[in-house]
Amino acid sequence: MVKVICVANQKGGVGKTTTTVNLSSALAQLGKKVLVIDMDPQGNASSGLGIKKHETEEKNIYHVLIGENTLQEVAFRANHDNLYIATANPDLVGAEIELVDMPQREFRLKQAIQTVASLYDYVLIDCPPSLGLLTLNSLAAANSFLVPLQCEYYALEGLSQLLNTAGLVKKGINPNLHIEGILLTMFDKRNNLSHQVVEEIKTHFKDKVFGVIIPRNVRLSEAPSHGVSIFGYDPRSIGALMYLELGKEIVAKRKTEVLEQNNVQNQEI
């Protein structure tokens, strides 16, 4: 059964796209078949996985949302085994407006994902840094949402707003939505403030925080300019090792979820 994870934070520059690109690549490295859906009009996840914008102008996630193509028709093979991506381009900005008058506008992405659910182990959705209809579609389609959180003073500023929005989505649109976890990013071990932020977040959110912390790493910053994930650029870097550990944590958590679901089903029988 496919697991759909929405990577969301309306605050920009927190490592959202970096996490989508490298976590999806880590899961692919672990033998899972993964589809990335780029819902950000900037299309950085697309270019970060080696897809040039001109290559997908006629077939991208915009065309899926407005009903011109199926999701499988716009899923391009990325530069990793087991990894595919439905790309974004600036046309996606118009989708926010066009979706307003469409029937079941919040469920367009969910309906598209249901058509390919049997083909993938994981679907990762890279959201734009906003809480508009594109993010709403993403949360409505997801089983869970992952929040990258920068280890800096203002990190918690937008988190409460995102959690509130997710709560409203859970209440009114997607009752199965839950938080996958909070991922601490851009950690600088030389900075006392980084340590303080980590302690504060772990104290407040406890087991909702991933065990893995993503450090500041120049190799992670350099990889997108080469159109590859960290695993294609420097697989021995600390950034690659940490994202691989995150992938293992996600897979282990999924196994636990499946066992719990099976136990519930057996009890009902």
Image (cartoon, grey):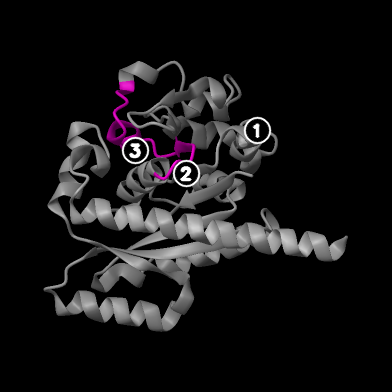
Picture quadrant of residue 267: bottom right
Give 193 or 229, whichever is nearer the viewer. 229
Distance of mark 3 from mark 1, alpha carbons? 27 Å
The residue that appears at 64% across and 57% down in the rendered structure is: 258
Quarter containing the C terminus: bottom right
In terms of sequence position, does the residue under pointer 1 or pointer 2 come before the other?
1
Q: Disc 2 designates what residue?
A: 125
Of the residues under marks 3 and 1, which one precedes in the sequence? 3
Q: Is there a contact, CB below 8 Å, between mark 1 and mark 2?
A: no
Q: Amino acid at mark 2?
A: Ile
Q: Which mark is residue 45?
A: 3
Q: Seen in the image, is 68 located left or right of residue 194?
A: right
Q: Viewer-proximal residue, 148 or 130?
A: 148
Q: Which residues are magenta?
A: 30-53
**Residue at far right of view:** 269
Which mark, by number, is residue 102? 1
Q: Secondary structure at mark 3?
A: helix
10 Å crowding of disc 3: few (<14), some (14-19), many (20+): many
43 is within the stretch colored magenta: yes
Closer to the N terminus: mark 2 or mark 3? 3
Residue at image location 52% in from the left, 61% down from the top: 253
Q: Name the quadrant containing residue 109.
A: top right
Rounded to the nearest whole Å, what is the CA distance between mark 2 and mark 3? 10 Å
Q: Is residue 221 left or right of residue 175?
A: left
